[in-house]
Image (cartoon, grey):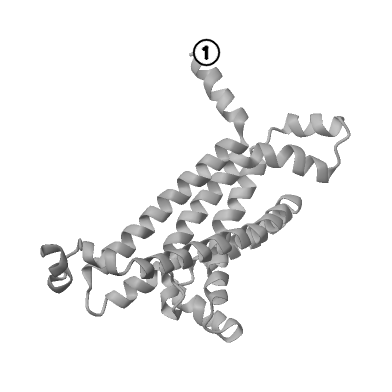
Amino acid sequence: MATANCLVTNDWICGEYLRTRTQELTDATVQHVGITTASVLLGLLVAFPLALLVRARPRWAGPVLGLTTLLYTIPSLAMFSLLLPFLGLSTALVVTGLVLYSLTILVRGVLAGLAAVPAETREAARGMGYGSGRLLWEVELPLALPALMAGIRMATVSTIALTTVGSVVGRGGLGNLIEDALPTFFKAQVLAASVLCVLLAVAADLLLLGLQRLLTPWTRVRVRAAAGGG
């Protein structure tokens, strides 16, 4: 009986809410994951050529990095207002805004990864006849993966948090539930949506960390060798 009454007493922890709103929570979580995934992937597609441009033409570093930093400082409401005439009240509006926010992390992540590749490794590859394209894809990117994945992990966690802001246009995933609950301060809904956001961030970070370890087995070998040598 106490559990059933928790909706009436507006308790923070309410099993009845979780039982009766399972589909609503699931739909919001799926939307949240979809928006986050699309935003990070599109952000990476934009950030990668920008980072290559900066590396090839260092004089562009200031303008590119300055612009991405400036975009990150724009308040979300202002960003959505600027994009609204072009994209309307749509998921594309939220995704585009999140892509722009992710660039400051992702561009720097790609640059940091490429800068971490030893110069002697590049020279050895060139000596073996590697052209610039083959050098990038077969030598530099694999060695840059640890730093690059660290940037992707940061961008993903940040985007999961920022996705909630999309609730201002009804496309905020779990943020929609938080905004809907605030006028009446529906505690169980606020807590459930907030906890799910945190769990999504932790799960995404662990998943990407596992992917990083899978794609960079040589880093585990170095760690074991160092431990054995110690």
State the image coordinates of residue 126 (x, y, percent, origin top left): 84, 34
Direction from residue 145 to residue 195 in the image, left or right:
left
- Whether 119 is drawn above or below 87: the answer is above
State the image coordinates of residue 133 (x, y, percent, origin top left): 82, 46
Circle 1: element type: helix
In this figure, which residue is indicated by the disc labeled 1? 229
Residue found at x 51% / y 76%: 79
Direction from residue 46 to residue 19 in the image, left or right:
left
- Whether 48 is drawn above or below 136: the answer is below
Q: Nearer the viewer, residue 210 or 86?
A: 210
Image quadrant of residue 4? bottom left
State the image coordinates of residue 177 (x, y, percent, origin top left): 34, 72
Residue found at x 38% / y 73%: 176
Q: Nearer the viewer, residue 205 or 43?
A: 205
Image quadrant of residue 62? bottom right
- Whether 76 is drawn above or below 192: the answer is below
Residue found at x 85% / y 37%: 130
Residue found at x 22% / y 74%: 185
Q: Nearer the viewer, residue 10 or 43?
A: 10
Classed neighbour count for the residue bearing mark 1: other residues with Cα under 10 Å, few (<14), some (14–19), many (≥20)? few
Residue that lies at the very extreme toward the top in this rendered image: 229
Direction from residue 128 to residue 43 in the image, left or right:
left
Residue 166 visible in the picture: yes
Residue that lies at the very extreme toward the bottom in this rendered image: 85
> Which amino acid type corresponds to the residue marked 1 in the rendered image?
Gly
State the image coordinates of residue 195 (x, y, percent, origin top left): 32, 58
